[in-house]
Amino acid sequence: MAKLQPLQPVVPMVRPPPIHALSPFEHLLQGKERPTSMLIHIFHTSFFDSNPADHLITVLPSSSILALRAVSSTTKAWVEEHYPALLKSLRVTCPLPRFSVQASSTLRHLARECTHLTINVLPCATPIPAGSVFKPTPSSQLFKIRWGFSTLRIELPPNDAFEPLLSLRRGLEAVSLQFLTEIHFEALSVMGLLALRWGGFDATKESTWIGGNFWRGLKSLRISMKIDGFEYNDAELHAEQNADRITMLKGKREIYRHSVQILHNYFFHYSLNGRLEKLRFDWIGGTGPNPLLLDEEVAEEVDGWKWFSAPGIVWKGLKEVWLGGVRVQGAHVKDMKQRMEGLENLVVWEDMAAIEIGGETKKVQGKEWLEIDLAADIIEVLGDIEDLFNETDVGRGEIGESIVVTFVLRL
């Protein structure tokens, strides 16, 4: 009788995963071979007999390029190789939505390629009650991603953005953004400026010596400031006779004084740093005071007492200044030159520069700017020459007649 052999275990056959061949379109992007099952016609002035993929990037909108990047690893590599600038500038909203794991992974990957980040701050839906302890929102976690951006633009909502901006600020101060050198605040209000104050004690009444290290590392700062809170004229109050209007104007004066003090204090701490090299300040909605000479422009005595006693700001290291919505006289230029040792470029709106100021006109984003010649000697005219002409009794424009006008020059 034959000896029975033990049964061998049945090993199921494991088929290797199917290898997905590249589609004809992916072959086209890789440029390995000309596809035979796909015919693509691209009408473009520079397209002749070369590979259509070389010109595809020129006819697709950015939204289609981003969608193409998500199709496969092949299309992703092709987009990043042929259109690297697409990922250099990113825009996110704040507060951030609840991301999925895949979306968070994508954001972390894009963050390394980003050089310019724009944050659009949405209005705060549920304001934090007064007196409550500040708690970081998910927006403060945004900067824990390993970013590579060097410029940051923060767009603020029309209404009060104190809490969202404070959250962003605390998030910025808690991480190390080694490449960041420039920040732009768009549509900043006085309350927003309070949220950003970092010298001494901040808006949360906590010492900010750690957070101050972040702000001291900036080399370029741009602020587009709302005029609300800075619109006031003492002459209007003194000329008013109506009691209700006088009460309203006095309240407006107090808001103005607090706003000026907050703005002056904010810039004072930057001036002590010495690392800030470029400053651009624009008023939104009207003409405002010179933010660098607030002690001179608004420090008049009222009713026998001086309400603004802060010393003038003396800057160290500031090389370039742009002022928009600020009326600039010859005396202002002299004062800024004295207070900013090493100032190389001073650029103002051409239509707000006094007639005695010379320089070179340039057009930036549709606006005429005047780059002031800082090396020239400025002769300040006290009074309007045109008005002085109009006050004389002599004829004008006739040959042979001499016009003698008396005016004062301060050299």
Image: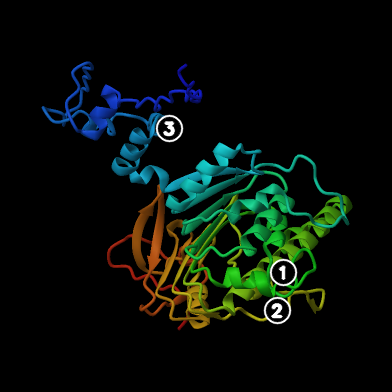
Residue at image point 50% right, 23% down: 7
- Location of the C terminus by quadrant is bottom left
Q: Nearer the viewer, residue 98 or 326?
A: 98
Residue that lies at the very extreme toward the front in this rendered image: 1
Across and down, in percent, residue 283 comes to 57, 55
The reply to whether discs 3 and 1 touch (Cβ–Cβ < 8 Å) is no
358 relative position to 40: left or right: right
Q: Mark 2 highlights which residue?
A: 310
- Give the x, y percent position of residue 385: 46, 67
Q: Is residue 189 left or right of residue 8?
A: right
The reply to whether discs 3 and 2 touch (Cβ–Cβ < 8 Å) is no
Label 2 sits on a secondary structure element that is loop
Q: Where is residue 147 in the image (x, y as percent from the top left)?
A: 51, 55
Considering only vertical position in the picture, is 122 above or below 51?
below
Q: Say which amino acid is labelled 2.
A: Ala
Q: Is residue 264 visible?
A: no
Mark 3: few, some, or many residues within 10 Å (few <14, many ≥20)? few
Q: Marks 3 and 2, how far apart in space? A: 57 Å
- Mark identifier at residue 199: none
Determine which quarter of the picture holds residue 132: bottom right
The local crowd at label 1, few if under 14, some if 14 to 19, many if 20 or more residues have their Cα within 10 Å, is some
Pointer 1 residue: 261
Q: Which residue is drawn at 40% across and 24% down?
A: 15
> Does dot 3 land on a helix, a strand or a loop?
loop
Can residue 68 be seen from the camera position used here?
yes
Q: Relative to 90, is 327 above or below? A: below
Q: Nearer the viewer, residue 222 or 43?
A: 43
Q: Which residue is drawn at 58% across and 66% down?
A: 290
Q: In which quarter of the image is residue 377?
A: bottom left
Residue 70's label in the rendered image is: 3
Q: Nearer the viewer, mark 3 or mark 1?
A: 3
Q: Is mark 1 on a helix, strand or loop?
A: helix
